[in-house]
Structure formats: C-alpha cells, structure tokens
Amino acid sequence: MDPVTLMMTGITVGLIVGMGAGVGVTLIYEKRAAARRKQGAQDEAEAILAAARVEAEQILQRADQKAKEECQQRIKHVERELAKRRHEIERRERKIPQREGALERKLDQVEEREREVNRLHESNLRRSEALKKQQEEMEKQKSEAARRCEEIAGLTAEQARKMLFEMMEADVRQDAAAMIRRIEAETRELANKKARQIITLAIQKCATDQVSETTVSVVNLPNDEMKGRIIGREGRNIRALEATTGCNIIVDDTPEAIVLSCFDPLRREIARLAIERLLADGRIHPGRIEEVVAKVEKELTEHIRETGEQTVFDLGISDMHPELIKTIGRLKYRTSYGQNILTHSAEVAKLCSYMAAELGADIEVAKRAGLLHDIGKALSYEMEGTHALIGADLAKKCNESPGVVHAIAAHHNEEEPRTIIAVLVQAADAISSARPGVRRESLENYIKRMKRLEEIADSFSGVSKAFAIQAGRELRIMVEPTEINDNEAALLARDITKKIERELEYPGQIKVTVCRETRTVEYAK
C-alpha cells in the first residue's frame, strides 16, 4: 500500500475515533446537566409545597378566629333578645292583675245594669197594665159621650157623618175653584213663556246659539308690520279678505294680533286658516287671497266630511246617507252655551244606546236618533223653523226611519213624544246638557243661584239649616225634629219645590231632600 494512502487512512480512522469520543463526552455532559436540572426542579417544588402548607395553616387559623368571633357575637345577640323577651313577659305579667281588676269592675257594672233593666221592665209592665185600664175607661167614656151627643143633637152618628160630608164637599168645591184660577194663571204664564221662546228663536237665527266670547277668533302675527300687509294699499287686501270670507277683520292696537268677528263659526274658521296660510306664504294680494280662500274652503269641506265619517264609525252606525254625514261634520263648528254640538250629539247617542239596552228597546234606532237629534242646528241659521223640525225634515229626506224622524222632532216637544225612543232622546239630551260644568255659567250667576236656593229653604219655619250641593242640583234641608213631624216634612219638601219652580230659572232639575233626625246621647262613666 502506498505510504500516502496509509497515512490518509490513519488520519481518517483517527478523525472517526475522535468524533466518537467527542459524541460520548457530550452525551455524558448532557446527562449530568439534565440530572442537575431535575434535582433543582424537585428542590423548587418542595419549597413551593412548604410555603403553601405555611399559608394554608395561616388561613385556617384566621378562619378559625373569625368563626369564633362571629359565634361570640351571635351568642351576645341571642342573649340580648332573650333579655328583651324576658322583660316584655315580666311587663305583661304585671299588667294581668290590672286587667283582671278592670274586667271584674265591668262585670259588676253589667250585673248592675241587668238589675236596672229588670226593674225598668217590671215598671213598664205595670204601666202597660195601667194604660190598658185607662184606654178601656176612655173607650167607655167615648161611647157614653157619643150617646149623649146623639141625645143632645137629636142626630144619629150616620146623620152627623152625612152632614160632615156635605160640609166637606162645599169646602172641596171652593178648593177646586181656587185650583181652576191657579191653572188659568199658570196657562197665561206658559203663554208668555212661549212668546218669549219665539222671540228667543228669532234671535237664535242670528246668533246661532253662541255666546259673545265664541263669535270672535284671534290670529297671532309674527310682527306688527304684517298688519300693514294685511290691510294692503288703500285697504284693498282687507276688503278682499272680508268679501271672500264674509268675516269682519278688526285691526286695532293689540300687539301682534288681529281679530276675526263673525256669527258663522265655519266662515270664521275659513278666514283664520286662509290668513295663516297667507302669512306663511308671504304673498298677500287680492288674486292670491281668492285663490287661498277657495283652496281652504275645499280642504275644510273634505275635513268636515271626514269628521262626520269618523264620528259615525266610532259610534258603530252603518248605512247613513252622505248628506247626513256631511251635516254631522259641520256640527263640529257649532256650540251652544260653550258646549260643542258634535261632542254633545255623540254623547247623547251613547246615552240613548245604554238606556235602550237596559229597557230592551231598539239600540240601533236609539243611537241614530241620539246622534241626529241636534243636526238641525247645522242648518238652523240658513232655514226657517226650529232646529228640531229642520233636523226631522232633513232626516226624512235622507230616508231615515219614521222612529228616528219622530224622535228628532219631539226632543223639544215640538211634537208630542209617542215612542220610547223619543222619550229616551229627551232624557239623554237633558242629561248631557244639564250635568254640572258642561255649559258655561258666569261665577256671579252661579253664586246667586246657590245663595237663592238656600234663602228659599230658610224662609220656611222649622228649617234649621239648608245646603245647596252638587253644583246646585240638590238642596239638602235639615229641620227641627220637635217642630216638624214626618208628614209635615213631606209637605215641606213639596212647598219648597213649588217655590223654587216659581222663583228660579235653572237648567235640568233640582232635587229637594228634607232630613229629619232625632238623636239621644248618653255617656257611660
């Protein structure tokens, strides 16, 4: 073998041996390092366990201490409660003898009262026997007196009774004559009242049942400069407004406001809406005024129809003529003594349906008659006649049933009520119109009426106190029981009622209640 090759072979073998020895040494070193790391981890784990044991012992000690403290606190609390209860028991035990003594005294009083009642009972029995004997004696004396009277007068009891009847008949004839004179006077008074009603109706055609406060509307302006624009050059704008709306427009010194005056509330509403739109638009001249007023009239007509349809729908009424629906919507712009006619009519319809249901009458007819009873007020200032007859004619033209037409015509006695529905409409109309607060009444007139009611009651003898209550719908009277007996109390109520009817004017009716009471009071000591 070549020496060079041998040398190379030796070197290679040496390198292989060296590398093997290096790997072995490395493995031995890694094994020892792993052993040292394992020993270190075991030592660290033992140290953590020792610290955890110490901490657990401390937690247990603190928990034990806290439990002991809580236990001591609860023991103290229970001891305090037991002490309170022992004190309460002792206090009640001290009161028991006192209560026993009070009960014994009350038992003695009860026994004494029983003895007294027994004595009174025996005394009453003796008095009853004495009264019975006296009554028998009086009957004998009465019979004897009657026999003697017959002997003295020369008349039998039957003859005397006949004579007495003849005298009473003469007195009754006189009373009848006085009653006839009174009825004649009342008839004349009724005729005068009817004449005043006719005059009032004529005034109604102009005033449309409205008080002065509801014949004007106020339109607020953004500034006082708008007054000049509403008036226009030489007053042409305001003249155009008054001509197209039919309302009087008052422009005075009131800051930032103008007043619309008109008896027709519908025209007043058209004028108000038109002016507000003109102010918002800014273009104010006669041509524009006519255009806006025409548009507002069209929209308001549609709104009136929708209002009528909604009212009929809310009441559950079907198959109503379109003309009636439109007229019902117009009632929204009518008032009577401050009461909105549409609201009043819907209320009367509901009341009629409720009462008809209770009486077993036709609910649908009652509801329709109640809703339509004042429909003539939407047309009364345009046509001749009372609103009841105008409404009845309109309902008849729109094919309403005869019962509904009659109820409308009879609700103010223009016709004599012939059906139960007509009577129900009258009653519901009175209830809706006369309940307290529904119609306007000045405070001064209200106070005067209340005061006058009490004065009328106080003017009768035997009246102790009189109180006008329920907004003047009831007069409650206290009488002296020693001066007025039960029969006289009934007569007193009737006399006061008649005097109220003669001297006062009032809506609806006034209930007069006479109270007579006797009290006996004793005090047990």
Image (cartoon, rainbow, N blue to C red):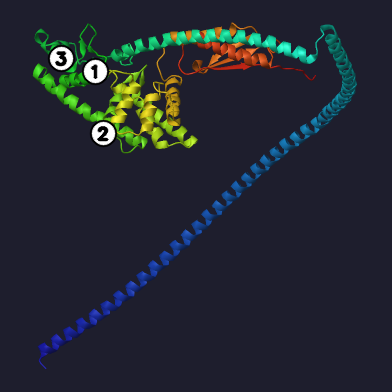
Give the CA distance from mark 2 to mark 3. Answer: 30 Å
The residue tagged 1 is 268
Looking at the picture, which amino acid does disc 3 mark?
Answer: Ala
The mark that comes first in sequence, 2 or 3, is 3
Crowding around mark 1 (Cα neighbors within 10 Å: few <14, some 14 to 19, many 20+) is: many
Crowding around mark 3 (Cα neighbors within 10 Å: few <14, some 14 to 19, many 20+) is: few
Query: Is residue 214 left or right of 509 when viewed as pictured?
Result: left
Give the CA distance from mark 3 to mark 1. Answer: 13 Å
170 or 49, nearer to the observer: 170
User: Which mark is drawn over residue 243?
Assistant: 3
Q: Residue 493 placed where, x, y %? A: 60, 14
Number of numbered discs: 3
Instruction: Give me the residue at 39% from left, 71% from top.
Output: 35
- Residue at disc 3, secondary structure: helix
Q: Residue 458 placed where, x, y %? A: 59, 7
Crowding around mark 2 (Cα neighbors within 10 Å: few <14, some 14 to 19, many 20+) is: few
Instruction: Give me the residue at 41% from left, 64% from top.
Output: 41
359 or 57, nearer to the observer: 359
In which quadrant is the C terminus drawn?
A: top right
Looking at the picture, which amino acid does disc 2 mark?
Answer: Pro
- Residue at disc 2, secondary structure: helix
The residue tagged 2 is 322
Residue 470, above or below 464: below
